[in-house]
Amino acid sequence: MLRQYWWKIICVAALVYTCIEGFLGSVPALPIINETIRNLYFHVAMWFGMMILFIVSVVYSIKYLRTNNHVFDIYALEYAKGGIVFGCLGVLTGSIWARFTWGAFWSNDPKQLGATIALLIYFAYLVLRNSMTDMDKRARIGAVYNIFAFAMLFPTIWIIPRMVESLHPGGMGNPALDTDDIDKRMRIVFWPGAVPGWTLLGVWITTLRIRLQLLAEKKQTSESSKKNFSHV
Amino acid sequence: MTRESLRFAAKLPVIGAFSQIFALFRKDLLLEIRQQYTFYGVLLYVASTIFVLYLSMGEPEGPVWKGLFWMIQLFVCVNAVAKSFLQEGRGRLLYFFSITSPGNFIVAKLLFNAGLMLLMSLVSLGLFVLMLGNPMPNPVVFIFISCLGGMSLSLVFTFLAAIAARAQQSAALMAILGFPLVIPQLLLLSKISNIAFAEVIQGGLAGMIGVLAGLDVMLVALSLILFPFLWKD
């Protein structure tokens, strides 16, 4: 499935559509936000991408714990890394947006803090993995921490930021999922274009990295078996 | 003595779990009473830290007091809980593996650490009021909040201590893993503490206590589900 190319075509088409419509299409003229409203296609879609990649990562961690198949561990790690990249881009695009609407790149808003904490939690996942040298132990403890971290992600980015005052929209529910909140012209770019486009791009990058890791591992095992053979 | 009671417990499947948990809990308690290291060690740590704070800050205002209190609680928790798994050597863990189930083991550890943190919270609250003054209009409420907070922190760090011990790393790894994970709890606790610090009760704080309690339940459930995977080698 992953080596098929039809979804890559969809990904490129969706992103081309998002960029063309995103920069040239008509958007509602609102005070304060003005043209920065176009950032919706990039900033909000990054969080969708991040969340989906983290969910896939935690599913592979659970699969690893159930089967002890080492391949699933590589999947979980690479999807988590993909999610982290999207999270960083989300914070970056968000702070640029904040500069032009709230007046500063960073204003210690609960949403900004929640996103940063979520990224710190996942950085800790990478640090934890690197602290161990034994491959099985690294995979198992990494999987356990990944599931734990994912569960802690919910209060961090979904519950607590909603409970305190914030400049960010969406205090009551999710602004992107509430379809009445988005203008009709933007909805037809956001849902069919931006969200699947960026998410598929994330999956694409991740699958390439997974294939690279698997190849590197294959090479290593074949080399080490050759070495063992020559000793005999 | 504990070994006999554990063997006895294994014969009764229904009451077995409870008596095993109790026996493991008692083992930790007896070790603590005999060795008298964690409690007095952390006590000295708390006392000297608060004394340093007193020397440098005098009697701070409410928000500063609150922030300092939760930060000290965080460090106390790391120090108090770190020992719980690191003290168990490889051989002793193998022994526990053969006589009890991972669920019972982690529940006993969670209970012991929650009890320890409960005590430490009360002690550090007392020392805070003694040295840094009392800026709270409702100090009685804050006693409950600090107990709840101490126990919540201990739940996170107990599980992280288990991870750090399995990764054969020092307490430093526990702090690295733990600090990002406890920020949501600390934010919640800091908000909830406003009940004790404000003259007027603010709305929405009851909901936050609910979220914190839900988070604690989730942490216990996750520890129970995930600990068996950490346990086997």
Image (spheres, rainbow, N blue to C red):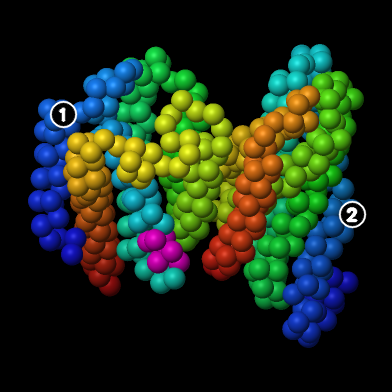
User: In the displayed structure, does residue A22 sit left or right of residue B231?
Assistant: left
The quadrant of the image that shows the C terminus of chain A is bottom left
Depth check, front residue: A223 or A202: A202
* SS at mark 2 in the image: helix
Residue A54 position (above or below residue B49): below
Residue A13 in sight here: yes
Depth check, front residue: A19 or B16: A19
List the residue tagged with mark 2.
B34
Q: Position of residue A130 (x, y in %)?
A: 44, 47
User: In the displayed structure, does residue A4 sit left or right of residue A134?
Assistant: left
For mark 1, name the chain.
A
Task: Give the residue drawn at x 82%, y 36%.
Answer: B141
Give the crowd class for mark 1: few <14, some 14-19, many >=20 residues within 10 Å: few
Amino acid on which the number 2 mark rests in the picture: Arg
Q: Is residue A60 magenta?
A: yes
For mark 2, name the chain.
B
Q: Position of residue B45 (x, y in %)?
A: 79, 33
Give the main secondary structure, helix, strand or loop, of the magenta stretch.
Answer: helix
Task: Give the residue drawn at x 76%, y 57%.
Answer: B111
Q: What is the number of the mark on residue A26?
A: 1
Residue A52 position (above or below residue A63): above
Q: What is the number of the mark on residue B79?
A: none
Task: Give the residue drawn at x 39%, y 61%.
Answer: A59
Q: Position of residue B218 (x, y in %)?
A: 60, 56
Give the crowd class for mark 2: few <14, some 14-19, many >=20 residues within 10 Å: few
Amino acid on which the number 1 mark rests in the picture: Ser
Depth check, front residue: A178 or B194: A178
User: In the displayed structure, does residue B53 sit left or right of residue B167?
Assistant: right
Q: Which residues are magenta?
A: A59-65
Q: Is residue B4 magenta?
A: no
Q: Quadrant of residue A67?
A: bottom left
Task: Give the residue drawn at x 32%, y 43%.
Answer: A179
